[in-house]
């Protein structure tokens, strides 16, 4: 079977769904190919900083989440070795709250997917190859030909890889494989049926080579995490099941951590407990490498995987989606039916505009996340303590996070036709 599409998006995660929604908002139809048989809602929670909320406002769905979740007001950082506690405020100079808002990943994904027209997502669709063919016209332009494992051939004017850290599209572009940071993370939700009693505050605990914390999603659920150095693991598989992961945290990795943290881990919903290696892409790969070829590019973790130390992985994916929608709208020739047709040669220019706009933003986030992890988790000497406690939390964290970054708005369909 052979079909033609304006835009094909590979992957129905946060980046892919948000990109499809951004394109819908500007009047461009798309097809999202997801290899899983159902919507992927794994992952306990994601923290959304103000820059992510600006993107969600542009996508038209922020109000559906702000009515459910509350932003974090302040944080506490406990030095496990000394017991010293430092308070971190998320309030800005103008009185605005710049803290993160934790949301259930499932809720975010389902909210984005719920805005898409029926049939936009095609499940159980595994990509096997990508080719480009030059069109026989007066201007040099090309289309992408995508082959699926079921024999389907899809011709597309634009292909956007949103297929995660191990992106097939990124490899096709020639980007290098993301590298292991030497750290791993165990994450999950803790459930307190009678209420946990914590306010809208994040609690961090640091020890040499280890960093942990928890924060509330609502009055009965807390998201918790534990990050540690584990460079001996080279495989991709979880080293143990959820029950053993929980036990390892409580009885080994975090055995010297405060009782408040251990109590949270003890209340873990084992169905939400996951383990993952923390990977990132070298910044210079985005500076000097190919993040696009003609009408093919990548977004989200497929483009800029980063460690979670700034909490910007999902936030930057939402930014990508809005920028892609805004740029591709420039290549649109509107139709009376509401969905316009993309001019292939203009789409290639739009993709170049997207890459140019995003390159230095995500290079800064990858570098800032790596720096943040190094400062917060490495070393116990006087210099590192001074750098972390006196400089980083007080002055640097808010600056390198870029929480006030505005990715812009999407043009309306009516304005495009004027």
Image: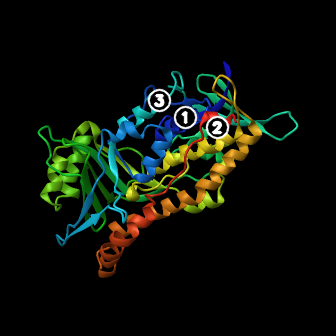
Side of 309 relative to 304 (left or right): left
Q: Earlier in the sequence, mark 3 or mark 1?
A: 1
The disc at residue 352 is none
User: Does 147 appear above or below 314?
Assistant: above
Q: Earlier in the sequence, mark 1 or mark 2?
A: 1
Q: Quadrant of residue 333?
A: top right
The crowding category of the residue bearing disc 2, from other C-alpha atoms within 10 Å (few below 14, some 14 to 19, many at least 20), is few
x%, y% of residue 144? 70, 35
Whether residue 317 is situated above or below residue 127 in the rendered picture: below
Q: Residue 136, image x and y in percent?
A: 85, 33
Badge 1 is on which residue? 20
Mark 1 closeness class: few <14, some 14–19, many ≥20 residues within 10 Å = many
| Residue drawn at x 52%, y 35% as measured from the top left | 21
- Residue placed under numbered mark 2 in the picture: 415
Residue beneath the point at 45% across and 54% down = 279
- Coloring scheme of the render? rainbow
Q: CA distance from mark 1 to mark 2?
A: 20 Å
> In the rendering, at what x and y percent does residue 403 appear?
43, 58
Labels 3, 2: front one: 2
For the N terminus, give its image quadrant: top right
Quadrant housing residue 356:
bottom right
Q: Which mark is residue 115?
A: 3
Q: Secondary structure at mark 2?
A: helix
Q: Nearer the viewer, residue 388 or 60?
A: 60
Is residue 407 rendered to the left or right of residue 94?
A: right
Q: Indicate which label's residue lies in the foreground, 1 or 2.
A: 2
**SS state under label 3:** loop
Q: In the structure shown, which secondary structural element does the residue marked by tag 1 occupy?
A: helix
């Amino acid at each position: 079977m052979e079909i033609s599409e304006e835009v094909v998006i590979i992957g129905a995660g946060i980046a892919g769904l948000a990109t499809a929604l951004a394109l819908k908002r500007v009047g461009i139809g798309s097809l999202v190919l997801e290899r899983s048989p159902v919507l992927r809602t794994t992952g306990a929670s994601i923290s959304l900083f103000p820059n992510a909320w600006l993107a969600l406002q542009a996508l038209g769905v922020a109000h559906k989440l702000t009515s459910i979740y509350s932003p974090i007001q302040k944080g506490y950082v406990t030095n496990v070795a000394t017991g010293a506690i430092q308070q971190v405020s998320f309030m800005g100079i103008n009185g605005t709250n710049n803290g993160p808002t934790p949301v259930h990943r499932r809720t975010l994904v389902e909210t984005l997917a719920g805005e898409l027209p029926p049939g936009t997502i095609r499940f159980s669709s595994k990509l096997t190859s990508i080719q480009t063919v030059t069109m026989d016209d007066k201007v040099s332009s090309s289309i992408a030909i995508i082959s699926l494992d079921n024999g389907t051939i899809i011709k597309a004017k634009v292909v956007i890889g949103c297929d995660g850290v191990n992106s097939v599209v990124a490899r096709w572009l020639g980007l290098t494989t993301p590298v292991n940071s030497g750290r791993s993370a165990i994450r999950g939700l803790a459930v307190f049926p009678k209420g946990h009693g914590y306010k809208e505050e994040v609690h961090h605990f640091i020890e040499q080579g280890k960093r942990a914390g928890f924060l509330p999603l609502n009055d009965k659920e807390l998201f918790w995490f534990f990050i540690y150095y584990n460079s001996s693991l080279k495989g991709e598989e979880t080293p143990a099941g959820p029950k053993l992961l929980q036990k390892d945290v409580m009885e080994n990795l975090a055995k010297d951590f405060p009782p408040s943290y251990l109590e949270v881990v003890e209340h873990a919903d084992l169905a939400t407990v996951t383990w993952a290696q923390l990977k990132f892409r070298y910044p210079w790969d985005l500076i000097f490498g190919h993040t696009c070829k003609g009408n093919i590019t990548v977004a989200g973790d497929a483009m800029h995987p980063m460690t979670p130390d700034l909490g910007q992985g999902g936030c930057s994916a939402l930014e990508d989606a809005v920028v892609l929608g805004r740029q591709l709208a420039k290549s649109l020739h509107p139709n009376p039916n509401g969905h316009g047709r993309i001019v292939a040669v203009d789409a290639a220019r739009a993709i170049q505009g997207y890459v140019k706009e995003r390159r230095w933003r995500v290079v800064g986030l990858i570098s800032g996340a790596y720096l943040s992890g190094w400062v917060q988790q490495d070393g116990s000497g006087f210099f590192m303590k001074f750098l972390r406690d006196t400089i980083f939390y007080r002055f640097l964290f808010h600056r390198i996070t870029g929480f006030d970054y505005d990715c812009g708005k999407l043009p309306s369909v009516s304005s495009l036709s004027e």
